[in-house]
Every structure is written in C-alpha cells, then in structure tokens.
C-alpha cells in the first residue's frame, strides 16, 4: 500500500508540475495563431484541445455503484497541428480504482494521429469552396455572363459536391483534393494513416477477433490506396484488476496474469466501407512479477491464445445488395504447463503449434456471422437476413465478454409508405444453445417483432410494437430441473406517442408511453405480468423551462401485485444569457417498498480562460421498511470543469 501511495503521489506531482506550463500554452497559443493570421503570415502551427476535471464526493458510496464515495478524474486531450496534420495526446489520471492491476487508479497516456479531425477540416474547406463557387455563380449577370465561365463554375461545384459526399483515401481522390488546393503534401501523407497511436488504444478489429479491451502499446493502421495494413502490440490488464474474477465473468474475462497482445490485419479497403481483411491475434499470458504482497500468485495458470479471422463487406446489384460478416477460429491453451498430448501428430499443426504449443488443455473452435440487406429503392422495401454461430469451445482472450455456444438465424422485411411517413417492419430471430449437448439445459427461443411507425406532418407521431417470444427449455437430466421440458411464452406490447405544440414563444411537448408484458409457462408458479404507464410534459418559454414526469409500474405474480409510482419534477432558468440553473425533485414509492426521495440543484457558467464550471449538489433519502436500520440519507457534491480551445 505504501508503494501504491508513493506511486500515485509521484504521478500527481508530475501533473501539477507541468500544469502551469500547459495552461499558459492553452491561453497563449490561440492568441499567437490569431495574430499570425491577422498579419497575413502563413499558418503552419495549431494548438487546440480539450480538458475535463471531475471531482465527486459523498458521505457514503452510492447503492449498487462501483464508483467510490470520493474520486478525482482528470482528462486532458491537447492537439498539435504541424503543417495541418493534427496529433492528439490523451492523458488520464483517476483515483476511481486504486488497484494497480486494474485499468484505473493510474496515469494513462496515449498519442495518436487525429485522422477524423483532419477529415473534418478538409470537409470544412470543401464546404467553403462550394460557398465561394455558389456566390460566384450568383454574381454572374445573366445578360453578360459567358456560357463557358458559368459551365466551369457549375462543373467545379459538382466536383466539390462529389468530394464532399465521397471523401476517401484513394489516389484519385487525393489527387483531386491536392489539385484544388484543399490538401497539403503533409496532410496527404497523414490521410494514409486511419490510426497511428502510442500508449492506450482501444482496437476494434471485429466482433469475434478483437474488441472491448484496452491495450497499452503501439497501434498503427496504414492504407496506401485500396490496401489496408494494421498492427497492434502491447499489454492489457484485467478490467477488474488483480484478484478474483469479476462477478458473472469466467477467468478468461477477468484475469490475474498479465497479458500481451500481438495483432495484425491485412486486406483491401477500410474497415467501415467495402473491404476484405485477414486478421490474426496472439495473446500470451505471464504471471506478474510483483503483487501487493510482494510475491507472485500461482493460483491461475498461464494461457496462450491464437485467433485467426477474415472480415468482409461488399455490394452487388448496383449497390442495392449489401453483404457483410466475418469468420474466425480460436486456438486456446488454458495451461502452458499442462502435460503434452498423447498423440504427437495433433500438436504438429503449422503455425498453431509454434505459437501455442498444444497440450491436453488445448482446444479449438470457430465463430462466424453473415448478414445481408437487399434494398428496392423504387418501392421503399428492405429485406434483411443473417446467420450467427459461436462454437461451444470458442474462447477468445481478446474479446473478454463474448458469449459462446449459440446458433442464431435472423430475418426481416421493412416497407415504407407515403414518402416514409409510415413504416411497417417485421423481424424474426431464432436462437439455440447447448450445441454439443454437454450442458444440463438446452434452450431454444424464437422472437418475433412487428413495428409500425407513423410520422405524418402536423399530427402526433406514434410507435407501436408487438413482440411475442417463445422459449423452450429442456433438461438433459430431469433430476436437475423441476421439469424435464417446459415452454415459456412472453408477449410484449409497446406504444409511445408524442406531440409538440408551439404557442408564440412557448413550446409544449407531451409524450405518453404504455408497455404491457405477460409471461405464461408450463410451470404456473412462474407466470407473471407487468404494465407500465408513463406521461412526460415539457414546457419551454424563453430562457426558462419546466418538466414533469410520472410513471406507474405494476407487477403481478400469482396473487401478489407490486405497484410503484415514480415522479420527477424539474425546471431550468438561464440568467444573464449564459448562467444556467437547474433544480428538481425525484420520488419513488410503493406499499411495503423502499421509498426514495431526492432533491438536486446544478449550476453551470462559462468562466473566461478557465472553461465551463458545473456544480451539482444532490441529497437522497432512503427508507426501507423491511429493515430495522433502513432509513438513511446520502449527500453528494460534484464539480466539473471543462474547456475546449
């Protein structure tokens, strides 16, 4: 613990040391660049960014919350642009989790190329050029205008509009931008890197190959023309820190050992467009050299995991057919110290054998997803279909929360009428688990979903939804279950409608929602029903507004009925054009239930040079009649300071 406190003090000291310098840069740099522009000097350097300081404290931890009673979080994202190329630094310090094995409770750092920001800047230049061309066209005198000049302006506008709608990194597009003076050579080079980062990164390769983890290391993605290359190398720690796995997660979701990730992909096209990518990920575990008690923990064996996959998306039938999906395989060795295989031939798989060294704890399985959408623009019809499979033994250390052992089929149709003011859709989804019949239960479920949307002008909008679900459960061992096989039927009906009425400077918005759910089973003791009614009213007038919401929820099972009432009242007022005040009341109660009453007030105001300061204080009263000491209060104070420059 002493080491941990010393470490956090050291990190905080470094932050406080550089903070005055960074604040001075934040204030000085925009003024400097503005002066350069006024003097007509070429603009070559830009400093911008964002920071947020969040401090929260309370007399006790929130019920059911993972956040501590008191914590401090500081996020800093400065961006430096050199020759128009933006480089962003992501810094985070938080005291939310003091466990050194977790992702929080320490100083995080990341440096990356802000390709999205660069693309937005280029789109802004294109839009300004389009506005200039439009003004030139309007300035032409119809009586004296030369047809060739008008045609040239119109052609330029068409070219700019096409670039705005289809801004990609193909050689032809980059040549167009550079010839039009909208792209510098340095920016052209940077556009080839969709991702270029050092430090903390969040790789999103695909659903079954790698996603949902934070990697501290190097993340590079390079796209020379239509080709696409990427790599990610670094360390990843358990989301729950060292210690036992998180509730509801297996050891492979939250882990004790330290993990290293080596990933790469190669293919054609960018990930969110038409593409075909081959992917490979290798995850290697090793025990931590130092833990809180100073000794390594041998409770969990070291694991190795090799994942291969391909991801694709393509169009056909004049781009009216869109097909996308992925196929993946996972080869896992749960314990690298386990005995070798009895049959040595099983361990002689090329590449796999050299990476994970298969033994009796090794396993392999596959996963895949294919989805297709077919559009008929003339009739406003859309058809969807898909299939998903995740094998029972598909375990991926680079996707910690992946659900396996399931097969799913899906399909649907959507039809629009009256210029899309009316839309009718029908969807069906069928799922089955226990694919190899090794579990005690086999569950199959079929879900239908019928929806109607009405959006006629000058009329209240309406959404209707009807969802019947049929679930069948079968126990392979009748001793394990109360019944060997039973069916669970659920019917859900949702309706929500709203309407806004402007009366002068006053705007009134009313929303009503109804929801009914009824479940019946072969086991009558599990039959239940629920009904929810909600009404929300918002009225805005000038710089003030009030809102009120009421919801009644009832739940019935056998002869018992639970009824709960929720009420929300609130209001807002803007003073001096920029100082916002908000206050409200929340109350939730029911017979023989926990009663919760909360009052809150918040105020936000922009402060020159410092940013926007938001302060909120909240007091909540709890009263649980089932407990002797069930009445208590909680007071929470929050302050947030944000600034963009």
Image (cartoon, rainbow, N blue to C red):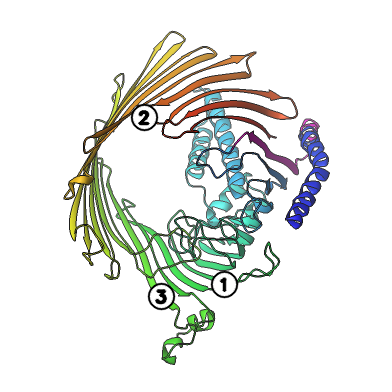
State how far apart marks 3 and 2 are (Cα): 52 Å
Residue 543 drawn at (x, y percent): 55, 13
Q: Is 589 drawn above or below residue 97 in the view shown?
A: above
Residue at 36%, 29% in the rendered image? 592
Closest to the observer, 186 or 493: 493
**Among numbered discs 3 and 2, the one appearing first in the sequence:** 3
Marks 1/2 in contact by CB < 8 Å: the verdict is no
State how far apart marks 1 and 3 are (Cα): 16 Å
Q: Looking at the rendered structure, which numbered label has been put on residue 364? A: 3
Residue at 35%, 68% in the rendered image? 392
Q: Nearer the viewer, mark 1 or mark 2?
A: 2
Q: Quadrant of residue 248?
A: bottom left
Q: Which residue is mark 1?
A: 284
Q: Quadrant of residue 593?
A: top left
Q: Looking at the rendered structure, which numbered label has been put on residue 592? A: 2
Residue at 45%, 35% in the rendered image? 627
State how far apart marks 1 and 2 are (Cα): 53 Å
Q: Nearer the viewer, mark 3 or mark 2?
A: 2
């Amino acid at each position: 613990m002493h080491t941990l406190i010393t470490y956090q003090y050291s990190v905080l000291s470094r932050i406080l040391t550089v903070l005055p310098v960074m604040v001075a840069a934040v204030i000085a740099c925009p003024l400097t660049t503005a002066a350069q522009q006024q003097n007509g000097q070429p603009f070559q350097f830009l400093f911008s960014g964002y920071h947020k300081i969040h401090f929260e404290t309370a007399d006790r931890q929130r019920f059911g919350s993972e956040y501590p009673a008191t914590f401090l979080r500081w996020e800093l994202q400065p961006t430096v642009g050199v020759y128009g190329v933006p480089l962003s630094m992501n810094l985070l310090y938080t005291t939310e989790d003091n466990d050194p094995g977790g992702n929080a409770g320490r100083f995080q750092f990341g440096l990356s190329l802000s390709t999205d920001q660069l693309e937005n800047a280029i789109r802004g230049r294109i839009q300004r050029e389009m506005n200039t061309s439009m003004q030139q066209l309007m300035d032409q005198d119809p009586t004296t205008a030369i047809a060739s000049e008008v045609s040239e302006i119109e052609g330029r506008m068409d070219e700019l509009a096409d670039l705005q709608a289809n801004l990609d990194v193909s050689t032809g597009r980059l040549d167009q931008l550079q010839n039009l003076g909208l792209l510098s050579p340095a920016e052209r080079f940077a556009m080839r890197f969709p991702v270029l980062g050092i430090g903390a990164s969040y790789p999103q390769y695909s659903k079954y190959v790698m996603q949902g983890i934070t990697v501290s290391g190097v993340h590079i993605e390079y796209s020379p023309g239509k080709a696409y290359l990427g790599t990610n190398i670094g360390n990843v720690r358990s989301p729950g820190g060292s210690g036992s796995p998180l509730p509801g997660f297996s050891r492979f979701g939250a882990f004790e050992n330290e993990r290293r990730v080596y990933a790469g992909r190669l293919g054609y096209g960018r990930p969110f467009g038409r593409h075909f990518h081959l992917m490979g990920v290798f995850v290697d575990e090793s025990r931590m050299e130092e833990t809180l008690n100073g000794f390594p923990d041998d409770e969990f064996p070291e694991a190795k995991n090799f994942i291969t996959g391909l991801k694709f998306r393509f169009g056909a039938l004049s781009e009216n057919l869109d097909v996308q999906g992925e196929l993946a395989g996972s080869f896992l060795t749960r314990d690298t110290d386990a005995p070798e295989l009895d049959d040595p031939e099983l361990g002689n798989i090329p590449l796999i054998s050299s990476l994970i060294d298969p033994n009796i704890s090794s396993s392999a399985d596959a996963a895949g997803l294919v989805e297709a959408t077919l559009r008929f623009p003339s009739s406003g019809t859309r058809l969807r279909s898909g299939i998903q499979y995740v094998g029972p033994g598909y375990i991926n250390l680079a996707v910690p929360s992946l659900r396996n052992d399931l097969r799913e089929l899906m399909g649907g149709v959507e039809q629009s009428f009256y210029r899309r003011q009316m839309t009718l859709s029908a969807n069906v989804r069928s799922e089955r688990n226990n694919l190899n019949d090794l579990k005690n239960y086999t569950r199959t479920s079929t879900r239908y979903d019928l929806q109607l949307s009405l959006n006629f002008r000058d009329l209240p909008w309406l959404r209707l939804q009807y969802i019947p679900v049929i679930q069948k459960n079968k126990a392979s061992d009748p001793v394990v279950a109360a019944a060997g096989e039973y069916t669970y039927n659920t019917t859900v009906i949702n309706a929500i409608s709203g309407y806004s009425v402007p009366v002068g400077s006053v705007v009134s918005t009313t929303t009503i929602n109804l929801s009914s759910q009824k479940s019946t089973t072969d086991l009558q003791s599990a039959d239940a029903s629920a009904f929810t009614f909600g009404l929300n009213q918002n009225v805005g007038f000038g710089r003030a507004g009030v809102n009120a919401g009421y919801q009644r929820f009832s739940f019935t099972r056998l002869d018992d009925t639970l009824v709960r009432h929720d009420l929300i009242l609130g209001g807002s007022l803007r003073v001096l054009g920029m100082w916002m005040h908000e206050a409200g009341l929340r109350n939730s109660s029911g017979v023989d239930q926990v009663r919760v009453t909360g009052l809150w007030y918040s105020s936000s105001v922009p402060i020159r040079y410092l940013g926007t300061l938001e302060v909120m204080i909240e007091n909540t009263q709890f009263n649980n009649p089932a407990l002797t000491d069930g009445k208590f209060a909680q007071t929470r104070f929050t302050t947030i300071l944000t600034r963009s420059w």
